[in-house]
Amino acid sequence: MSLKESQRSLRAWTKQKWRTASGKKSSKTGEVYAPAKTIAKLKSTAAGKKKLAAANAKKRAATKKGKQHAKHGLHKGKKR
């Protein structure tokens, strides 16, 4: 039995190791969650660090306003 595209996508998504840049809980730090590969790639360049810092700032601002989800743009352009 083959899986539907949405089921394959969900399976791939759950296999990824999701974390924050610091490795601590987002509820404590206010950081965004992203796949570990994405975090490593962003932390390796100055532009990536700047993008990650901007995403974290947007996440913290949204959290402060009581929002559960923040449109930080870190995953923009990715098929999710």
Image (cartoon, grey):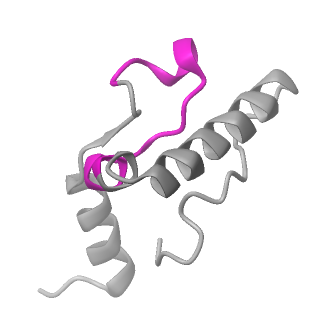
> What x and y, as percent, mark residue 35?
33, 50
| Relative side of 25 to 44, left or right | right
Residue at figure coordinates x 24%, y 45% from the top left:
17
- 45 and 20: which is toward the camera: 45
Vertical arrangement, residue 33 with respect to residue 4, above or below = above
Q: In this view, does 79 lie above or below 41?
A: below
Confirm whether the magenta stretch covers residue 25. yes
Measured as percent of width and height from the top left, residue 64 is found at 82, 22
Quadrant assignment, res 9: bottom left
Considering every residue shown, the one lying at the far top of the view is: 28
Residue at the limit of the structure toward the left, as seen here: 1
Tell me residue 33's x, y (percent). Answer: 46, 40
- Judged left or right of residue 8, residue 32 is right
Q: Which of 48 and 16 is in front in this view?
A: 48
Residue at 58% of width from left, 52% of height from top? 51
Quarter residue 52 falls in: top right
Location of the N terminus by quadrant is: bottom left
Q: Which residue is drawn at 51% across and 24% down?
A: 26
Rendered view: 12 above or below 74: below
Q: Using the image as rendered, state which of residue 45 and residue 71 is in the foreground.
A: 45
The residue furthest front is 46
Q: Is residue 24 magenta?
A: yes
Q: Where is residue 70 in the image (x, y as percent from the top left)?
A: 72, 45
How many badges with numbers are in the image? Answer: 0
Residue found at the very far right of the displayed protein:
65
Q: Which residue is drawn at 83% across and 25% down?
A: 66
Q: Magenta segment range?
A: 23-40
